Amino acid sequence: MEEDEGKEGILTLDSTKEELRRAIFGHPEDNAGVEKCSFNCYSKQVVDGLVMEMKQQPRKIMVNLGLAFLFVLVLWFCVKHTIHSIQEIKRQEL
């Protein structure tokens, strides 16, 4: 009985991943995944895929967003420090 529940969960996860893949890349039968679609259609598919991924693994997504934010923050501090150093060098030359 427990084995059936485990398999059902795996099948649900696999089917959800398949739906996500199809939402982003299209059906394999349709010109090898290439669909004739406008930019709005592609952006809607990508957003739908991200929403579906967030529903499946919200903690993983939040950790990745937090790490991305920290990376941007550190990058901003480095750029700010570099600009300040360049300005200081220019002041010393004058």
Image: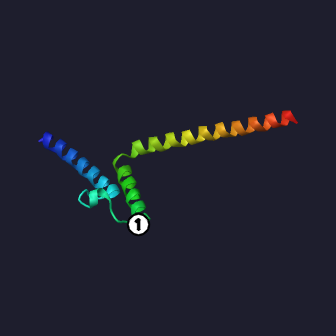
User: What residue is drawn where x is 60% and y is 37%?
Assistant: 74
Nearest the eye: 73 or 46: 46
**Callout 1, which amino acid?**
Ser
Nearest the eye: 45 or 68: 45
Q: Is residue 73 above or below residue 38?
A: above
| Quadrant including the N terminus | top left
User: What residue is drawn where x is 57% and y is 42%?
Assistant: 72
| Farthest-out residue, left | 1
Image quarter of residue 57: top left
| Residue that carries the numbered disc 1 in the rendered image | 38
Image quarter of residue 10: top left
| Quadrant including the C terminus | top right
Picture coordinates of residue 81, whole percent (x, y): 70, 36
Picture coordinates of residue 68, whole percent (x, y): 51, 42
Nearest the eye: 79 or 12: 79
Q: Give the secondary structure at mark 1.
A: loop
| Farthest-out residue, front | 31
Q: Is residue 25 above or below residue 62?
A: below
Q: Is residue 31 above or below residue 74?
A: below
Residue 19 shown left or right of residue 62 in the figure:
left
User: What residue is drawn where x is 30% and y is 57%?
Assistant: 33
Numbered disc total: 1
Residue 47 shown left or right of residue 6 in the figure:
right
Nearest the eye: 90 or 69: 90
| Label 1: how many Cα within 10 Å (few below 14, some 14–19, many 20+) | few
User: What residue is drawn where x is 26% and y is 61%?
Assistant: 30
Picture coordinates of residue 77, whole percent (x, y): 65, 38
Picture coordinates of residue 48, whole percent (x, y): 37, 58
Residue 90 shown left or right of residue 37 in the figure:
right
